[in-house]
Image: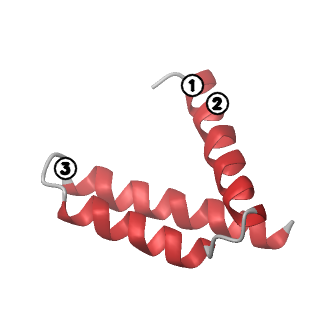
Amino acid sequence: MGEEREVALGIALKSLLATAEKQGVDLEALAGGAAEALIVDRAYGSWYVSQAILEIQKAVDALAVE
């Protein structure tokens, strides 16, 4: 993946999470649900799933700091 696309996806994830939080969504519960969905979907390889879960949690944690 190109660096520009990676940055854009990170910004998109952060924006989605910030919007969800403003609408009253529990971000920890949302992240947990997303992790569960990734784990049970056999379409994804295990390395990608673990990395995706890590990136989701890092994005949630970053919003908590701001």
* Mark 3 → mark 2, Cα distance in angstroms: 23 Å
Residue 8's disc number: 2
The answer to which image quadrant residue 60 occupies is: bottom right
Q: Pointer 3: residues within 10 angstroms few (<14), some, or many (20+)? A: few
Residue at the (52%, 57%) spot, across then down: 55
Q: Which residue is mark 1?
A: 5
Above or below for 50 versus 10: below
Residue at the (30%, 56%) spot, across then down: 49
For marks 3 and 2 on the same chain, the one whose residue lies earlier in the sequence: 2
Element on which disc 3 rests: loop
Count of labels in the image: 3
* Mark 2 → mark 1, Cα distance in angstroms: 5 Å
The answer to which image quadrant residue 37 occupies is: bottom left
Confirm or deny contact between disc 1 and disc 3 (CB under 8 A). no
Q: Position of residue 64 (x, y in %)?
A: 77, 72
Q: Which residue is mark 3?
A: 45
